[in-house]
Amino acid sequence: MRYSKIIVAVLCASMTLASCVKEPMREEITTPSDGESYAAGEIFVKFTPEVASVIEESGVVRSNSTRSGVNSVDEVLDLVGGFEISRVFPVDPRHEERTVRDGLNCWYIVRYSNDYTVEEVSRRFAQLGEVQKVDLNRTVKRANTRKAIPLSKAEYERMQTTRALQQPFNDALYAKQWNLENDGSLFTKDDMIKSLVGADVQVVEAWKKSTGDKSVVVAVLDEGIYVKHPDLEANIWVNDDEDGSLNEDKDNNGYKGDRNGYNFVHDMGKITWNDYYDSGHGTHVAGTIAAVNNNSIGVSSIAGGDGSAGSGVKVMVCQIFSGNISTGLYNVVRAMKYAADNGAVVLQCSWGYVSGAANEYDWGEAGFASEEEWIAGSPIEKEALDYFINNAGSPNGVVEGGIAVFAAGNECAAMAGYPGAAEYCVSVAATSADFTPATYTNYGPGTTISAPGGDQDYYYNYHNPETKAYGDVGCILSTLPEHISESGYGYMEGTSMACPHVSAVVALGLSYATKLRKHFKAKEIREMLQAAQNTTPIDSYMKGYKIYSRYVADMGPIQPMQLPLAPFKGEMGSGQVNATKFLAAIGGEDVGVAMHFPNITIKVGGSVAVAPAAYFVGGESLTYKVAIADTSVVTCEESGDKLLFKGLKSGATTATIEASNGEKHSFNITVRKSDGWL
């Protein structure tokens, strides 16, 4: 997927309300070139904190308005035919304090008359002392991924046979998922061997430690997911504070009806997946992460549990694509913040800019060539991504901060695309079933790690002679919406498919840390994931060349092509993701810290519920006793599997909680008059 880019004004001087118009210190605006794509009649404007406060007082924060309440800003709105100004990120009282701290409350989207160009309007706002930054609502396009190849019902029945291995789960199609367990038998023909034992994500041994925990949430920023799919429904995230009503925001987080996530394309809680032009991409990605394991149907997944209660990570739907409707950066950045604010700790992003090293003849204008260029050219995206990385998770939970995982890109370019190429993200290249790089994958600078992504052009000579169709073999088998595949399953390929393998392994590692009651910083998790000693080495396979038939699924076998492998040596990240090694690292004695019952802050007359089992190893089978030093300040009572603390008066007190195994934690309780935002 390709974003267009623009370097926008960056105002560096300190500004006040009195300095309505002045000559700002800024970089020169680079106007869009032909072919760059952005929403006409819209720009993002980041105001100074002082001006944002004035706009907030005018009532624009909670509803759209035609005016800001700031004279100089409204003068520009009048000049350009401005008809709407609204805050980009809705108010969520639970997290408004950190939203203000990180400056996201200062971002507004301004909509204006199409009689004016984005260059004209950007320049006018950039000249205001009240403005810090200006950005474009660039059009976000899908990755260049071929359509899903559906699995027919007849083929589904035929494929329910096993290879020469003992399946860890009873899922019907497990034997065809070489990406999960590769015994080397699937792609061998005469003297051709394109499958190697162990060329997978090494998850079978990892499953002995964890199969996924329901407390770990992965936000999938993609097409809508078929949330009623029988192999996914049990592992779809549910916002218990919403009842499915699309017209009410019952949890007051700024989004109506967000029961399973949010449809940012259509600005509604209802998730869509059955548009005529939908590819099934989001559903396919979700299946790799968290299809329900051990339920006798369909596929297995990396972190989908073992069929027992409480197992399997949850997938939060952050829909940023729908059919052939163009989506913009407005939807992307809101989805990133939504994920952090609503409990996701892993951001799954199978999209990104075209590589800065891409062949412009094939791909048009190349994307950002450096991290500095991306930061300057996409400030609102950078700030939203920073917000997720810094604020997801909890200092009292299994991980503090979030892990953002991106596809490296499909342009066969010697550089990963942004944002994933940024140093604090994970960028995933794609491999085949013999450890060789997929013929389309990006590699080189910015690439963090590799994972199975499929390679139909490479496996064309293993096609099914009965169907006489090319393209299914060598790809990744996963879930699909039933309007695309009658069986509910099918194949896709790309770094888009490699990416969820890594997201899922991260989620599996966090699930194991949850079991161990260990706490990590997000940076620690990211570093352990990509450490060379925790991956499968693949550089020894980067020699000679591989033969493939380009676009075989569309045109059939044509003149074979050669892909030299030497350029990929040392350029596919630290190695191929290895779940077994990663979970072993999570369990190491010298990493992470033991979780501790948290300090509690309550408002007078309010209450806070805490599940004590989350802080003691094997906590679900223990009982607990709480002792509070000053019960005139706060009281505690049992409420199901939680402890309910009730604030009686302003003050502070110490307390202890002792488990039936003898483990004891001390903590502090503070009761104050207000816990809301001002």
Image (cartoon, rainbow, N blue to C red):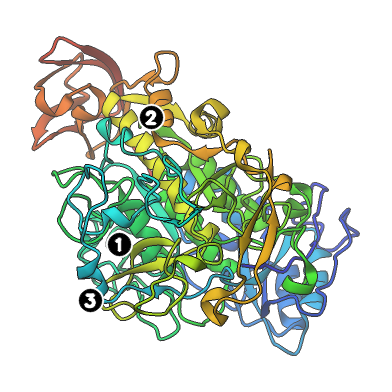
Farthest front residue? 190
Q: Amino acid at mark 1?
A: Asn
Contact flag, marks 1 and 3 (Cβ < 8 Å): no
Q: CA distance from mark 1 to mark 2?
A: 29 Å
Residue 583 numbered tag: 2
Q: Please name the residue shown 36% across and 66% down the image.
A: 283
* Mark 1 neighbour class, 10 Å CA radius: few under 14, some 14 to 19, many 20 or more: many
Q: Camera-side residue: 33 or 226?
A: 226
Residue position for label 3: 154
In the rendered image, the vertical position of residue 619 relative to residue 41, given as above or below: above
Q: Amino acid at mark 3?
A: Ala
Q: Secondary structure beneath disc 1?
A: loop
Q: Quadrant of the N terminus?
A: bottom right
Query: Which residue is at 21% across, 42% downward?
Result: 166
Residue 382 position in % (x across, y down): 64, 52
In the rendered structure, are the residues bearing label 2 and label 3 in contact, judged by CB atoms less than 8 Å apart? Answer: no
Q: Residue furthest top?
A: 662
The quadrant where residue 621 appears? top left
The mark lying in front, picked from 1 and 2, is 2
**Residue 445 on image: x %, y %:** 72, 45
User: Mark 1 = which residue?
Assistant: 260
Is residue 546 in sight in this rendering?
Answer: yes
Q: Secondary structure at mark 3?
A: helix
Q: CA distance from mark 2 to mark 3?
A: 38 Å
